[in-house]
Amino acid sequence: MNRKNILIIAMIAVIGMILAFFILRSDKPSVDPHDHGSEHSEESYEEEFERGPHRGRLLTNEAFKLEVTIYERGVPPQFRIYAYENKKEIPPQDIKATIELHRLGGRRDTFQLEPKGNYLGSDKVVEEPHSFDVKVLAKFKGKDYQWEYSQVEGRVELSPEVVEESRIEILTAGPQTIKTILELPGEIVLNKDKVAHVVPRLSGIVKEVFKNLGDEVKKGELIAVIESRELADFKSEHLATKKKLELAEATFEREKNLWEKKISAEQDFLLARQALAEAKIELQKATQKLISLGLAASDLEKLSENMDLTRYEIRAPFDGSIIEKHIALGEAIEEDADIFAIADLSTLWGEIIVYEKDLGVVKIGQEVTVKSKVLNLEAQGKISYIGPLIGEETRTVKARVDIENPNGEWRPGLFVTVQLVQEEVRVPVAMATDAIQTYRDWSVVFVQYGDFFEVRPLELGRSDGKWVEVLSGLSEGEKYAARNSFILKAELGKAGASHDH
């Protein structure tokens, strides 16, 4: 065999190996281990049980098979069951199914599944953690079926000796008196009800500017003058219609006298009266144009042909301070240019960031204390607004407190701490704050069951820094890991806990 043939055979072998690699790889399921919303488990590609077409656990009894999934894409977790006979889907209405869950501590949850589309579904939520012994009962064609399996998640086993060596403190959940002082971050911002953006409403050339950044202004005070040909046209129109009205009034009076003396025809009188009415309407239109531009009625009375008709005076809308300036002498500006921003700084807003978990605590009208450590300032106020929407990414809501600022000590942009007014509350179930750990997207506590510790998602309420109210997730009398519970979280990470659906 010559060298050329040997090279050809070697190349064919290499290509075959590459093809085999990709074929084998394509047979493996494409599973996103971070996808909580699909019907599969969060675990490695090493599958420990047979899976069905919907990536659920496949339970088999000869030709009859059930595929059990926990579906949570866009909805709270719920059971879904798909049935098959000889690899063909069975209509869900032909199946009766019940699922029993047995959790640590003796709790049992029962789910009756009903036909929904092409599957059997549960109306009850499958509460987290999804860690339990499962019993599936089904009836098909008059025959009863039963399967049992276990699903473990968020669970760690430690002997009493290891717990003691690790100095993990075990406490019992129960009633507690909590002195509620909730601290929330905030920022001083402008009172948006007292901020005005001044626009000229006419194009022109800047002739005079009387105010600069930071200057104080009074309502009606002159802050700039613009030279506007458009304004000259409006004023000229007003003067012309005013002259026209005077002429129409004189003509009307003359025709009225002539008609009353039967010297002229009634038609001439009626025409004069109509002309007078039209002149009044034209003057009213011309007057309204100028008033809409900010000119006062007293200014229009003084208007004459000898005046500078191009002069357009811009005045402050209320008392305040110049916080923005976008105008310069000789500059050509358009009618919608934002030339000044004026703010009344005598009252400001404290914008508070309220976390999702604290929404049940913060109320409109609640007294708060606003503190600035940088400037050593403190102010009292009441929450006047709580936003209706929760930020999709931040999971927070903005609230607001009104702050009186007569001396100008508070400044917009200043970061502050907002404390809710202190009160003492006796709550039925509380736990130590140092017991709280994070697991996936939850705040959790490790509940003890003998040698086992299992994560329990929490809904928390008021806190005083030492104790925190438990609204759901932990019951009175249950034992949990407090101090040094982070060790359990570390052990859980080593175990590579799965989220098996």
Image (tube, rainbow, N blue to C red):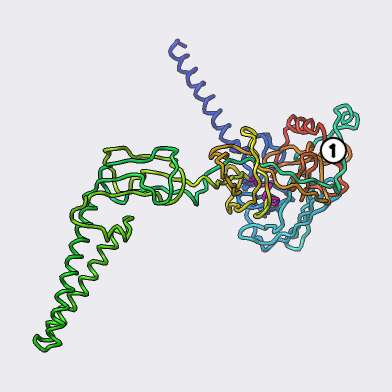
Residue occupying the point 65% across, 51% down? 382
Asked if residue 459 lies left or right of residue 186, the reply is: right
Asked if residue 268 lies left or right of residue 46, the reply is: left
Circle 1 packing at 10 Å, graded few (<14), some (14-19), many (20+), is: some
- Seen from the viewer's position, the closer of residues 386 and 348 is 348
Residue occupying the point 11% across, 89% down? 262
Question: Looking at the image, can residue 107 be seen?
Answer: yes
Residue 255: horizontal and vertical position, in percent? 13, 81
Q: Quadrant of residue 289?
A: bottom left
Q: Is residue 332 above or below residue 234?
A: above
Question: Looking at the image, can residue 84 be seen?
Answer: no
Residue 19: horizontal and vertical position, in percent? 52, 28
Asked if residue 229 lies left or right of residue 220, the reply is: left
Q: Residue furthest top?
A: 3
Residue occupying the point 54% across, 30% down? 22
Q: Residue furthest left?
A: 263
Q: Is residue 80 magenta?
A: no
Q: Is residue 47 above or below residue 64?
A: above
Disc 1 marks a residue whose amino acid type is: Phe
Asked if residue 36 lies left or right of residue 228, the reply is: right
- Seen from the viewer's position, the closer of residues 166 and 292 is 292
Residue 276: horizontal and vertical position, in percent? 19, 74
Q: Which residues are magenta?
A: 354-361
Q: Which residue is mark 1?
A: 452
Residue 131: horizontal and vertical position, in percent? 77, 44
- Seen from the viewer's position, the closer of residues 116 and 140 is 116
Q: Residue furthest bottom?
A: 262
